[in-house]
Amino acid sequence: MKRKQCTPTYFQCDDEMEELNAVALIHRKESAAPLTTERDGNIFRYPPSYPLALVLRLRVLQIVCGISMIVMGSVAVIEERQKFNMSLGIPAGSFSLLAAALSIHTSRGWGTVTSGAVGASSAAFLWVLSACMILALTIQCFRTIFEVPSETTYSSDNDGVEDTKESRDLIIIALIQIALAFITLLTAFVCARIDFTK
């Protein structure tokens, strides 16, 4: 059935371009949803009980946490004077970023985009690798928190004040990285639980 194009008679345009824009705006307001009452429950090729919107929000949170871990790992490299302690945030954030991005494409709502078994196995491998790196980062952060106060040396000049400031900065970086690691692992657990139960 062909739709009739109607232009409103109450709208007066001086220019032809304005008239075309007005007609285009009217047609943009029309709904793209089917007008029949019979709706197919499998429009997006996933069961209606699968919370795709929640899963996508959690994946975006994982991506944001991964980027933040990369940034905090870079700050830790600068603060620790190129030591490879809390700079594990760079590879941990990179792997969690890649795993979350790949998991978006292998989630149930995007089943037509990727092949199921290969994408799911590669996403699972990246999540295991990411979890190992995040756990190593968390251990290094706890070691930094517990070792920093014992490493500060107090001398008669102003170096002791600078050492305590550096140790305070390292503790703050470690706490931020622990929080990011916890959020990333928690959201990965929640997404895995949703995927395996629904």
Image (spheres, rainbow, N blue to C red):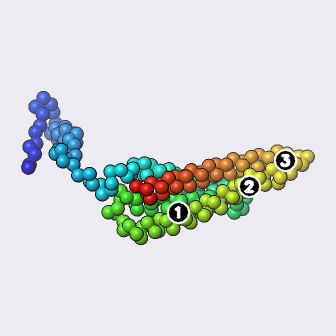
At x 71%, y 54%, the residue is 142
At x 56%, y 50%, the residue is 183
For mark 2, give the secondary structure: helix
Q: Which dot marks residue 160?
A: 3
Residue furthest toward the right? 156
Return the residue at label 2: 144
Label located before the other in sequence (3 or 2): 2
Label located before the other in sequence (1 or 3): 1
Dot in front, 1 or 3 = 1
Local crowd size for mark 3, using a 10 Å CA cut-off: few (<14), some (14–19), many (≥20): some
Amino acid beneath label 2: Thr
Say whether residue 175 is visible.
yes
Return the residue at label 1: 127
> How far across and how far down the image is residue 157, in percent?
88, 46
Local crowd size for mark 2, using a 10 Å CA cut-off: few (<14), some (14–19), many (≥20): some
For mark 1, give the secondary structure: helix
How many marks can you see? 3
Amino acid beneath label 1: Trp
> How far across and how far down the image is residue 62, in percent?
51, 53
> How far across and how far down the image is residue 57, in percent?
44, 49
Whole-angstrom CA distance, mark 1 to mark 3, is 42 Å
Q: Nearer the viewer, residue 176 or 45?
A: 45
At x 56%, y 66%, the residue is 129
Residue furthest toward the top? 10
Q: Nearer the viewer, residue 77 or 11?
A: 77
Q: Is residue 41 left or right of residue 93?
A: left
Q: Nearer the viewer, residue 184 or 157?
A: 184
Q: Nearer the viewer, residue 77 or 88?
A: 88
